[in-house]
Image (spheres, helix red, strand yellow):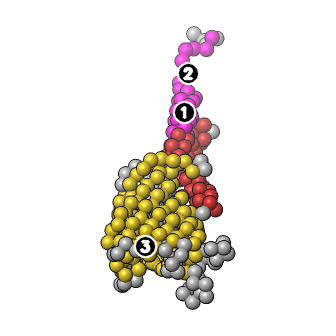
C-alpha cells in the first residue's frame, strides 16, 4: 500500500514541478500580452477657446479603440481608432457630430489604423498589418508596456507625425491603484495645425499609467495651436471623465489580480511538488525497508530446540 501511494505521489510531484516550470517560463509570455478583443471607449471633457466659430466653449471628446482580431497575430495587435471633439455649451451635445451639424459643434474628428507589439506596446509598421499607404507610427501609441519602468519612453504624437519623449515624473495612487506619472511636453513646434495650414503646436500632457499592465488610467492635456502670425486657432484643455477613470481603475485592478496569480503560480506549484516528492520518497523508502524486513532470514535458535 505504501509503495502504491508513494508511486502516485511521485507522479503528482513530477506533474506539479513540470507545471511550475511552465508557469515560470512559458505562461507569463502568453498572459502578459495586449488582448486581441480590445473594444474601449474613452471620454474626456474640458474647455476650448479660439474655436472655428471664434468663441470659447465647454467641449467633450470621445476616443474609441477596437482591435482587429483578424489582422492581428500572436505577436502583433492591430487597432482601428476613432476620435471626435465637439463643442458642448449646454452639456447636451452627442459624443460626435458631422460637418453638417446645424449648430456647427464639430471641432475635429479623425480615424487611425496602427499596429503595436503585444508585449512592448511599440508601434509596428508593416503593410501586412495596416495596409498600403497607412501613416507610419513610432514609439508607444495607445498604452505603455507591461511592467512599466521609471524611465523616459518615446510616445507617438499624431500632429507632429513622430514620437516625442514621455518622461517619468513620479509615482502616485489613484483610488488605491499604484500608477506612474509621465509627462509629454511639446513647446511651439512647427506643424501642420489644420488641413493645409502651417503654424506652431504646443502640448502639455500628463498620463497616469498602471504599473502592471501599462494601461493609461488618467490623462489631462493642455494643447495650443497657433498660426505663424501668433493667432490662436485652438486653445484646448481636456481630461478623462471621472467615469472613465473609475472604469480604468476597476479594469486595471482586475487584470493585475490575474497577473499576480500567474506570478505566484510557479512558487505554489513548486512548493506543492516538493512536498509531494518528499512524501513519495518517504513512503517508497518505508515500503522498501518493510519488504526487506519481511524477507530476511531468521537468526538464533528456538528456546526449546533439540540438541
Residues in magenta, as a range: 274-303
Q: Which of 10 and 53 lies nearest the eye of the viewer?
A: 53
Residue 70's spot in the image, x, y percent?
Answer: 49, 78
Q: Residue at x 61, y 88 (%)?
A: 102
> Mark 2 falls on what kind of element?
loop
Q: Which of 70 and 106 lies nearest the eye of the viewer?
A: 106
Q: Is residue 132 left or right of residue 221?
A: left
When the figure is inspected, residue 218 is found, relative to residue 105, above or below; the finding is above
Q: Which of 78 and 222 lies nearest the eye of the viewer?
A: 222
Q: Residue at x 53, y 58 (%)?
A: 218
- Residue 232: give its label: 3
Q: Residue furthest bottom?
A: 100
Q: Residue furthest left?
A: 190
> Mark 1 falls on what kind of element?
helix
Q: Which of 49 and 163 lies nearest the eye of the viewer?
A: 49
Residue that mark 1 sits on: 282
- Residue 298: give its label: 2
Residue 294's spot in the image, x, y percent?
Answer: 58, 29
Residue 229's spot in the image, x, y percent?
Answer: 35, 75
Q: Earlier in the sequence, mark 1 or mark 2?
A: 1
Residue 46 makes an appearance in the image: yes
Closer to viewer: mark 1 or mark 3: 3
Local crowd at mark 2 within 10 Å, few (<14), some, or many (≥20)? few
> Mark 3 falls on what kind of element?
strand
Q: Residue at x 54, y 72 (%)?
A: 56
Q: Are marks 3 and 2 in contact (CB under 8 Å)?
A: no
Q: Is residue 232 left or right of residue 250?
A: left
Q: Give the position of the C terminus as an image quadrant.
A: top right
- Residue 79: give its label: none
Residue 63's spot in the image, x, y percent?
Answer: 54, 72
Q: CA distance from mark 3 to mark 2?
A: 108 Å
Q: CA distance from mark 1 to mark 3?
A: 81 Å
Amino acid at each position: 500500500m505504501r509503495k502504491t501511494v508513494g508511486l502516485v505521489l511521485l507522479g503528482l510531484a513530477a506533474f506539479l514541478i513540470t507545471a511550475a516550470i511552465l508557469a515560470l517560463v512559458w505562461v507569463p509570455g502568453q498572459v502578459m500580452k495586449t488582448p486581441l478583443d480590445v473594444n474601449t471607449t474613452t471620454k474626456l471633457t474640458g474647455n476650448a477657446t479660439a474655436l472655428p466659430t471664434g468663441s470659447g466653449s465647454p467641449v467633450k471628446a470621445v476616443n474609441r479603440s477596437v482591435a482587429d482580431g483578424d489582422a492581428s497575430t500572436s505577436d502583433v495587435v492591430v487597432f482601428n481608432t476613432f476620435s471626435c471633439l465637439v463643442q458642448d455649451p449646454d452639456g447636451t451635445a452627442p459624443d460626435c457630430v458631422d460637418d453638417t451639424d446645424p449648430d456647427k459643434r464639430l471641432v475635429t474628428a479623425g480615424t487611425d489604423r496602427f499596429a503595436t507589439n503585444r508585449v512592448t506596446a511599440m508601434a509596428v509598421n508593416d503593410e501586412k498589418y495596416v495596409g498600403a499607404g497607412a501613416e507610419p507610427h513610432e514609439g508607444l501609441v495607445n498604452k505603455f508596456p507591461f511592467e512599466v519602468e521609471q524611465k523616459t519612453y518615446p510616445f507617438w504624437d499624431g500632429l507632429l507625425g513622430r514620437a516625442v519623449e514621455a518622461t517619468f515624473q513620479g509615482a502616485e495612487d489613484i483610488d488605491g491603484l499604484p500608477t506612474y506619472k509621465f509627462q509629454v511636453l511639446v513647446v511651439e513646434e512647427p506643424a501642420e495645425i489644420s488641413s493645409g495650414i502651417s503654424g506652431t503646436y504646443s502640448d502639455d500632457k500628463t498620463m497616469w499609467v498602471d504599473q502592471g499592465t501599462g494601461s493609461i488610467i488618467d490623462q489631462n492635456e493642455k494643447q495650443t495651436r497657433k498660426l505663424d502670425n501668433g493667432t490662436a486657432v485652438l486653445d484646448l484643455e481636456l481630461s478623462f471623465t471621472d467615469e472613465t477613470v473609475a472604469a480604468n481603475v476597476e479594469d486595471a485592478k482586475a487584470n493585475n489580480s490575474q497577473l499576480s496569480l500567474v506570478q505566484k503560480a510557479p512558487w505554489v506549484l513548486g512548493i506543492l511538488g516538493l512536498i509531494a516528492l518528499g512524501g513519495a520518497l518517504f513512503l517508497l523508502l518505508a515500503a522498501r525497508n518493510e519488504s526487506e524486513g519481511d524477507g530476511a532470514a531468521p537468526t538464533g535458535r528456538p528456546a526449546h530446540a533439540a540438541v
